[in-house]
Image (cartoon, coloured by chain):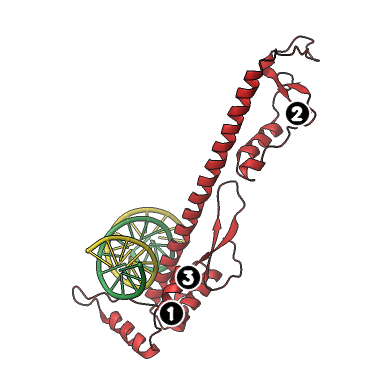
Chain colours: A red, B yellow, C green
Amino acid sequence: MAVLPSSSSNLELTISVPGFASSPVLLPLSSVKELDINQVPLEEDWMASNMEDEEEGSNGDPPRKKLRLTKEQSRLLEESFRQNHTLNPKESLAMQLKLRPRQVEVWFQNRRARSKLKQTEMECEYLKRWFGSLTEQNRRLQREVEELRAMKVGPPTVISPHSCEPLPASTLSMCPRCERVTSTADKPPSAAAAAAAAATLSPKVPPTQSRQPSAAC
DNA sequence: AGTGTCAAAGCGCTCG
DNA sequence: CGAGCGCTTTGACACT
């Protein structure tokens, strides 16, 4: 994932749809809002409650206290996450934040999960839009076919320059650039043409803008 | 009361 | 075999 400078209140994400160059997208980070709402506890009080948590677990059913990270802790964690999505070395960061290494580890795990979730949501959103535009394009082409059928123009007789025989109408198509009738029977699709067709199908460019004049001529 | 968020825990998988 | 990680669930807390 690309790392770009961003403010601490933004969650940096990239979307990686197959065939697409990943593009960073900035999203609001909801956790910051929550931390703003909360009063930041005094360091000593907060640490005291943290250390109480550390003692738990020796006997059965210890009450699990909800930990709230301070603004500064969140900021440092986010900064560290932006530099590297995996945690290393965990002890030094934990010491810097006055947290247990396990807490820092868990934070990174959760942070990665949130990142992935956001990315999945964005991919889903993108695919929905893509599906919509493909549906629209399909509708347009269907209409075009109907119009052409309605014209009921007799098929032109085209003599192949190679075989000197009349070509079947089904093999003929109009080049949109030079507006000449070409035949697919004369020229079987090359590997390059197939690749170009695949490129048209793959979402490298917005689907509605991907129709280029064919390179038949 | 219902819902959303997020720290934390538990479990299984992979890898060196 | 242990460390590290992903995935899922749990529970505390805030907000409506």
* Mark 3 and mark 2: Cα distance apart in space: 54 Å
Amino acid, disc 2:
Ala
Q: Which of A71 and B10 is in front in this view?
A: A71
Q: Are marks 2 and 1 on the same chain?
A: yes
Name the chain letter of the residue that bears numbered label 3.
Answer: A
* Mark 1 and mark 3: Cα distance apart in space: 10 Å
Name the chain letter of the residue that bears numbered label 2.
Answer: A
Q: In which quarter of the image is the C terminus of chain A?
A: top right
Amino acid, disc 3:
Leu
Question: What kind of element bears circle 3?
Answer: loop
Q: Residue A216 carries which label?
A: 2
Question: What kind of element bears circle 2?
Answer: loop
Residue indicated by mark 1: A94
Amino acid, disc 1:
Ala
Q: In which quarter of the image is the N terminus of chain A?
A: bottom right
Residue indicated by mark 3: A87
Name the chain letter of the residue that bears numbered label 1.
Answer: A
Q: Is residue A181 above or below residue A21?
A: above
Of labels 1 and 3, earlier in sequence is 3
* Residue at image coords 75%, 28%: A216
